[in-house]
Amino acid sequence: MSTGKPDVGKEAAAIRDQGYVLIPDFLSPGQMSSIREALAPHLRREHLGRNNFEGHETERVYSLVGLGKLFEDLAEEPRIMALCDAFLEPNYLLTASQAICIHPGESPQAFHTDDAFYRIPRPRPAVSLSTIYAIDPFTAENGATQIVPGSHAWSDPELENILKAIDFETRGPEERRPRPPDPTIEGKIEGKVIDATMPAGSVIVFLGTFLHRGGANRSTAPRLALSNQYCQPWARQQENYLMSIPRERVRRMSPGVQSLLGYSIHPPFMGHVKGVHPRRLLEGGGTGREMK
Ligand SMILES: O=C(O)CCC(=O)C(=O)O
């Protein structure tokens, strides 16, 4: 994990200017091998994507933060938290935490932004901040994330139909087909797309308003990445950690991670449980108003 007191001024400035920053040497080789070891039992091609957005040749492990201490530590990594502090309001939340393994033969994802489902007119501040950690080196051949620098500032008309182009429809294996090019966006971004190629251990951090996609994997080996995303404390989280991670496990997590999962309040009282702070449920106190 990155060491020392984070000085994120430059990184935050790059994000403000271009929509993203790429930070090399973020994870140590030791961390990466622990991550691989922890993920191995979950990456056996048993849970390939069910639609063109997840990717039929892509494996995803959701609620990653619930899989062990190293993923908890990554979720509250100090340098990433400092960047979240720069773009999000206090008590921001983890909204997505997943491993993404793009297998050979996968086609490119549709271009999208990670906060598109908050239907607030653009241009606007981002509702979320995303991270993608390269566990394998990201190359142009193996499915490096493809990005459009500056797109975080684009207006709705410039991104017209972007959500409609994303295909979430679930199909059986017999109906699977390559992901088609997205005619509503391809022309607009021609010449602006770059492959976020980076050595293993790097992380790319970008705004929720930033256009990107998982690339095609034309190599012969899988491309493994982790992605944690954070959202404003008043926004609905993509993943429902209150249901996906048992409370017994959450009790053993740090107060910071508990808060990121949703055991927190957006003042004065968004997120309360029968009038009390949700942390009380972790302390075993209950609310004093339990249903009979
Ligand atoms: O895997 C990647 O490089 C990007 C994936 C992505 O953007 C997503 O699934 O939302």
Image (spheres, rainbow, N blue to C red):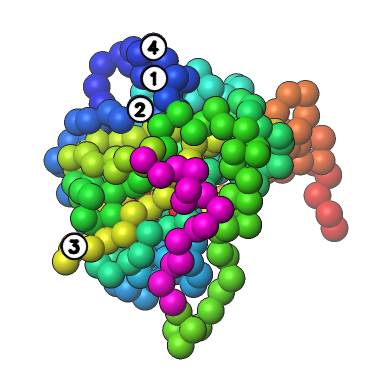
**Mark before the other along the chain sequence, 4 or 1:** 4
Tag 3 near tag 1, CB within 8 Å: no
Q: Does the magenta stretch include residue 269?
A: no
> Which residue is labeled 3 in the image?
219
Q: How packed is label 4: few (under 14 Cα within 10 Å), some, or many (20 or more)? A: few
Residue 120 seen in the current view:
yes
> Which of the numbered marks, if any, corresponds to residue 9?
4
Task: Tell me the amino acid under the disc marked 2.
Answer: Val
**Residue 216 appears left or right of 72:** left
**Mark before the other along the chain sequence, 3 or 4:** 4
Mark 3 and mark 2: span between their CA atoms? Answer: 26 Å
Q: Nearer the viewer, residue 17 or 199?
A: 17
Q: Where is residue 107 in the image (x, y as percent from the top left)?
A: 35, 65
> Which residue is labeled 2 in the image?
21
Magenta region, residue range: 177-191
> Which residue is labeled 1 in the image?
14
